[in-house]
Each structure stands twice: as structure tokens, then as C-alpha cells.
Amino acid sequence: MKANDLYKLFEQQIIEYHKTDNVDAPQHSPYKSGTFEAVLWEKSWVDTVQWHLEDLVRPDDVEPVYALQLKRRIDRSNQHRTDLVEQIDDHYYMQFKEVTLQPDARINTETPAWAVDRLSILALKIYHFQIEANRGDEAHRAKCQTKLDTLLTQRADLTTAIDQLLDDLAAGRRQMKLYRQMKMYNDPSLNPSLYKK
């Protein structure tokens, strides 16, 4: 799956979410459960819901108990997001594990799935800046259009970089390694604020 295809899947999911624009709406994936595409869709759904949860917690007048509930939900969402990224990396690891590495095969600063994660977030930014570039007064629209143009350049660069990374992995020019996030804040056995109770 090429990076532009990944982006189109994310874009489709974002449009689907905004049909209800409701963080509690059920997810309706068009992909069969257990497929790589279904994992990508779920990852994008989690990102989109979390984007809007972050919006809900921002106003100064948000009720404190509700804000804490949102914060806890965002924490759970972050963990789920990380778990999905690791599933995506598992897919790529299985795809490339039998590749014979070239003697000078390099490592990469991030795994393919974390690059895909950035593409998913970028799709959300582009979607929302497209709205903002068509809203408000002329100064607001111009400012947002400038930012949107930068995001579109980033999309072109990131999709190219992801495709190059996957091509390099397939050819053995780069090594496919798995790095787990090993988050501590949600683990009662690792977070002192939790295990000291």
C-alpha cells in the first residue's frame, strides 16, 4: 500500500467521522475486521476522536470534573493509539522480516508505523485547515491558506519519504526494527503516583 493510498484511507475516515462529528458516535469501518486496512481505519478514527476530545477540554469555562473525565479519556485514547501503531509496525515487520539486508543497510530514526501515524495526524490538520481557509474574514482566510499550503507540501514530502522508506526496507537498504513505546504513565506497576497508593 503506497503512502498516497494510506492518506486516502485516512481522508475517507475523517470525512466519515464528520458526518456526525460526535466523539461518542460508533465507528463504521468499511474494512473487514483483522485486515491491515481495518487497523489503519481504526487508528485514524482514534486520532480523529482524540482531536475533538482535545478541542472539548480547551475552553477556559469547561467544568473541572468534566475536564478531568476528558483528560482520562484522552490518556486511554493515547494508549490505544500507541497499541494500534505497534500493530501497524507488526504488519510491516512481518512484511520485511525475510528480506536479506545489504551489508551497509541503515537504520531509520522512526519505524514505518510512526511515520504513518504522522501522516494520519497530518490528514486531520489538512482537513481542518481547509475549513479555516474558507471561513472568517479575508485576513483569517489568507493566514490559514498559507498554513494549508505548508501542510500540503509536508504531505507531499511525507508520502514520498514513507514510500522511500518502504522501498528501502523491501530492498534491504534499511533494517526493519521494532521499538515499543513502553509507556509508564498508564501502568500501575511503573507509575509511582499509582503504585505508592
Image (cartoon, helix red, strand yellow):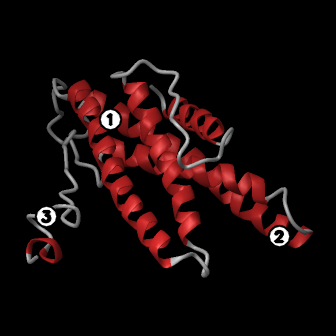
What residue did someone put label 2 on? 140
Location of residue 116 by image quarter: top left
What residue did someone put label 1 on? 168
Circles 2 and 3: CB atoms closer than 8 Å: no
Task: Determine the residue located farthest toward the right in the rendered image.
Answer: 138
Location of residue 63 by image quarter: bottom right
Q: Amino acid at mark 1?
A: Asp
Q: How far across and how far down the image is residue 75, in percent?
A: 35, 61
Q: How far across and how far down the image is residue 36, in percent?
A: 37, 26
Mark 2 or mark 3: which comes first in sequence? 2
Image position of 124 (left or right of 108): right
Quick one: 115 or 196, which is closer to the camera? 196
Instruction: Determine the CA span between mark 2 and mark 3.
Output: 46 Å
Instruction: Determine the CA span between mark 1 and mark 2.
Output: 42 Å
Circles 1 and 2: CB atoms closer than 8 Å: no
What residue did someone put label 3 on? 188
Q: Secondary structure at mark 3?
A: loop
The mark lying in front, picked from 2 and 3, is 3
Q: How far across and how far down the image is residue 141, in percent?
A: 84, 64
Image position of 113 (left or right of 193): right
x 49%, y 46%: residue: 119
